Amino acid sequence: MAKTCKPPRRRRKGRKFLFTGFTHKCPSLLTLRERLDEAKSMLDQLQNRKKRSAVQIKEYEDRRDRAENPTERKQLDDLISNLKSEMQVLAPGEQEAQAKEMELAEQLRIEQGELELLENELDRLDRSIMSAALPLVTRNR
């Protein structure tokens, strides 16, 4: 699972710009995660519906092949036709949901990369400040 947003460890004046970037990235990451979860859920629902319809079509076809009554065969043919039409209608929605999921996943990866860069820069600045302050601390003792 992706990293969660964590608050900065310490606040210093020199970090105002980085904190601003950091705090703006966290909400957008959370929103992207929510949107990605929704897109995945929608795609799962469409794919499950497609699978159920395919199973149902197969069952109706088997029943139709065993049916001796022409009226029953006609009813089953109509049901099969309706399910196949429904599956054709769902296909573009499934493709759209897949594309949306892929797009959101890519956006999330980009945002996470940017957040990681900010965290790395913050760590680098932390080390620089600490190494610059160390001689002052040792000199004042």
Image (tube, rainbow, N blue to C red):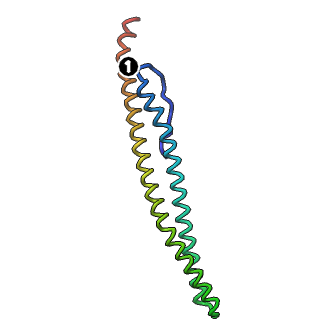
Q: Quadrant of residue 113?
A: top left
Tell me the quarter of the image containing the C terminus.
top left
Q: Residue 8, how many percent across, how many down?
A: 48, 28
Q: Return the x and y of residue 77 as percentages of the image width and height.
A: 57, 85
Q: Position of residue 45 (x, y in %)?
A: 56, 62
Q: How many labels does the image show?
A: 1
Name the side, left or right, on which 41 lies relative to 13: right
- Name the one closer to the observer, 97 or 4: 97
Give above or below for 74 relative to 43. Answer: below
Residue found 49% across the figure and 63% down from its top: 93
Which amino acid lies under the numbered mark 1 shown in the image of this protein?
Ile
Q: Which residue is drawn at 41% across and 46% down?
A: 109
Few, some or many residues within 10 Å of mark 1 (<14, 14–19, 20+)? few
Q: What element carries label 1?
A: helix
Q: Quadrant of residue 73?
A: bottom right
Q: Is residue 87 left or right of residue 71?
A: left
Which residue lies under the disc numbered 1? 129
Quick check: 137 above or below 69?
A: above
Question: 108 or 84: which is nearer to us?
Answer: 84
Tell me which residue sits at (48%, 40%) in the image: 28
How far across and how far down the image is residue 133, in percent?
A: 38, 14
Nearer the observer, 86 or 126: 86
Residue 130 vertical position relative to residue 139 in the rendered view, above or below: below
Q: Give the residue at x 51% y 70%.
A: 89
